[in-house]
Amino acid sequence: MRRIGFCASMCLIVVGSANANNGDQMVGFSALSNAMGGAVTATPQDVTTSLSNPAGLATLDLGKSNTRFDMNLALLNPIRELNGVSSDNDIYVMATGGFAFRNSSLGDRLTFAVGAYPVSGGGVDFPSHAFTAPVNGSPSPVSIVASRQSLRIGPAVAYKVTDDFTLGGNISLVSNMMSVKGMTNFPTDVAYGASFVLGATYDITDQLRFGAAYTSKTYSEDLNWNLNNGAYSLSFDDPQTIALGLSYAPSDRLMIEADLKWLNYSNVRAENDLITPPSMPDQKLTYGWDDQYVIALGVKYALTGKYSLLAGYNYGASPLKEDDINNNIGVTAIVEHHLSGGISAQMTKFTTLSFSVIHGYSNEMTASVGPPTKVKFETNLASLQFTYKF
């Protein structure tokens, strides 16, 4: 019983383990949004505004023919340690993409988009000498190999109510994949669900714009695992969020934005019930995550008509505290400070390439309750974005 309960609690190991993240949610979904430190609620940078604030589609530059594609390829380098032992997998490749368009036959005030974006996830691969678990009163070495990915795919629409006021919405199919290998193996399972985003922007003046967005929690079916002794299931959703942003453009060349975001982790990461086979009592998994408040700052400066520089800073206090570490063995969702920079260059009449790097500064925590388990995490994410505007 103790053995199964421990292994089930490890289902959170991979949360936030491989991204530039706020808790276990990505800072941005593209090279441009990462370069801005995730400060994109008021003024959109690309089609990924479909998820951050779909109302931004109405003011996004789509080119002369009102059709735009944004594709991103990212190389991720997470550096993770558990009790001084490094995880073996430290390189990931990620891809995202979406397009947006306006159709004059439907009205110039409507903008449509569709895209596919990972919003959280990653993996760890710690050898057995990294962690020792109590089993029937005796310590046993445990290797921890796990992965998780939360992906959203779906359409978005924005409507320009007036020249100053826009509304938008997004609905997404959610794919939630997880696997855990420890003292007991939970093989890969995929659970499906849905989520939505509602947003608005308002131009207070010609230079000042306000943006707001609400993202629902994911409403997913339970993850299910069939083991030799029966079936297990676990509910595991991403949190609802509220984002507020204010951007200021004192000139045609300079734009500054500040965002404040609330992530409701206490609703989905405080505790969950692991449903076990009938011969066993269900397990209450107490993770203990707190809500997170994130501050994001971004600056974009146009050097010329073809080249722009971007920089950003992002801070969110860890939703995990020292007394939660042993309830989230190996979790690395503790990075608090991010610094980013990037460049965007128009290559041809229709194409733009953007490159950014975001660094999550190292943070280390040691469990204050139970064994003195120590976790340490920092991350680097380099992204290359291809934009095509007709």
Image: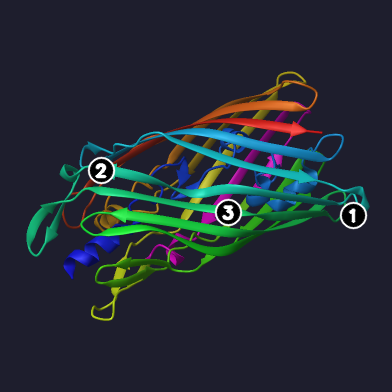
- Which residue is labeled 1 in the image? 106
Pick whichever, 37 or 58, lies toward us: 58
Considering every residue shown, the one lying at the far top of the view is 304
x%, y% of residue 165?
81, 53
Q: Tell me the kind of residue under disc 3.
A: Arg
Q: Amino acid at mark 1?
A: Leu
User: Label 2's element?
Assistant: strand
Residue 39 visible in image: no
Q: CA distance from mark 1 to mark 2?
A: 54 Å
Q: Is residue 54 magenta?
A: no
Q: Which comes before the other along the chain, label 2 or label 3?
A: 2
- Residue 267 falls within the magenta-colored stretch: yes
Q: Residue at x 59, y 62 (%)?
A: 195
Q: Quadrant of the C terminus?
A: top right
Say left or right for 131 vs 221. Answer: left
Q: Quadrant of the N terminus?
A: bottom left
Mark number displayed over residue 126 = 2
Q: Position of residue 77 (x, y in %)?
A: 41, 33
Q: Is residue 263 left or right of residue 195?
A: left
The span from disc 3 to disc 1 (Cα, nearest Å) is 26 Å
The image quarter containing residue 327 is: bottom left
What amino acid type is highlighted by mark number 2? Phe
At a point 19% along the width and 43% down the height, the residue shown is 130
Visual colour scheme = rainbow
Pointer 3: what residue? 152
Mark 2 Cα-neighbour bin, 10 Å: few <14, some 14–19, many ≥20: many
